[in-house]
Image (spheres, rainbow, N blue to C red):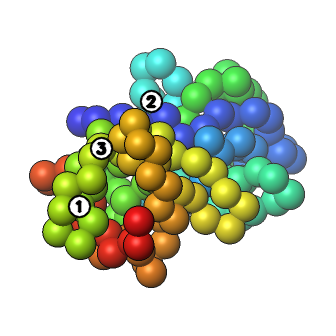
Amino acid sequence: MEYLQVGKYTNTHGLKGEIKIMLELSNKGSIFDIGNTIYIGKNKVPFKIMSYRRHQKYDMITLETLDSIEAVLPYKGEYIYINSENMKKTIVENLIDYEVYNNGTLIGLVVEILKGTKYDFIVVSDDRIIIPYINNFIVSIDKDNKIIKTNYMI
């Protein structure tokens, strides 16, 4: 199993085991869908998500078997992980080192992700070609072969 660190459990909320998570990803996709499993801490303890909501800058979740403040407190400050192989949606942070083909021509590798307010950008190779990570420019992403196809005017 391949784990991806997605955030940090920063605090509790209320008395019924709800936890605040500071997400480290700009595109959370379906990470917090009810029924999904997250993993907490160095030992990657698995927990099934029972509820999710957004509150201010935090993602708020409750977890199966952790239904009180006393039950969740031992995990406070720990990092949150997911099984990246089970993600329904590609997370932009996973695209580092993917080959990028623009209109059929290899232009380089993804070397960096720039965070924007509306969307992210992929930075390709040392030439620092910057491509918006939106459907208008990203034609396809092949996760098995680590290839991104684009149609961006360079």
Residue 121 seen by the camera: yes
Residue 109, numbered circle: 3
* 121 versus 138 height, above or below: above
CB contact under 8 Å: marks 1 and 3: no
Residue 45, numbered circle: 2
Seen at 82% across and 59% down, the residue is 55
Give the camera-side residue of 5 and 66: 5
Q: Is residue 154 left or right of residue 18?
A: left
In what element is the residue under mark 1? Answer: strand
The mark that comes first in sequence, 2 or 1, is 2
Q: Is residue 68 left or right of residue 98?
A: right
The mark that comes first in sequence, 3 or 2, is 2
Q: Position of residue 89 (x, y in %)?
A: 38, 64
Residue 131, numbered circle: none
Seen at 75% across and 33% down, the residue is 10
Kind of residue sitting beneath label 3 = Leu
In what element is the residue under mark 3? Answer: strand
Judging by the rendered image, the residue that carries numbered circle 1 is 101
* 138 versus 10 height, above or below: below
Q: Position of residue 56 (x, y in %)?
A: 86, 57
Give the camera-side residue of 132 and 32: 132
Q: Position of residue 2 (x, y in %)?
A: 28, 36
Quarter in which the C terminus is drawn: bottom left
Q: Label 3 to label 2, Cα distance in Å?
A: 34 Å
Residue 31 seen by the camera: no
Kind of residue sitting beneath label 2 = Val
Few, some or many residues within 10 Å of mark 3 (<14, 14–19, 20+): many
Few, some or many residues within 10 Å of mark 2 (<14, 14–19, 20+): few
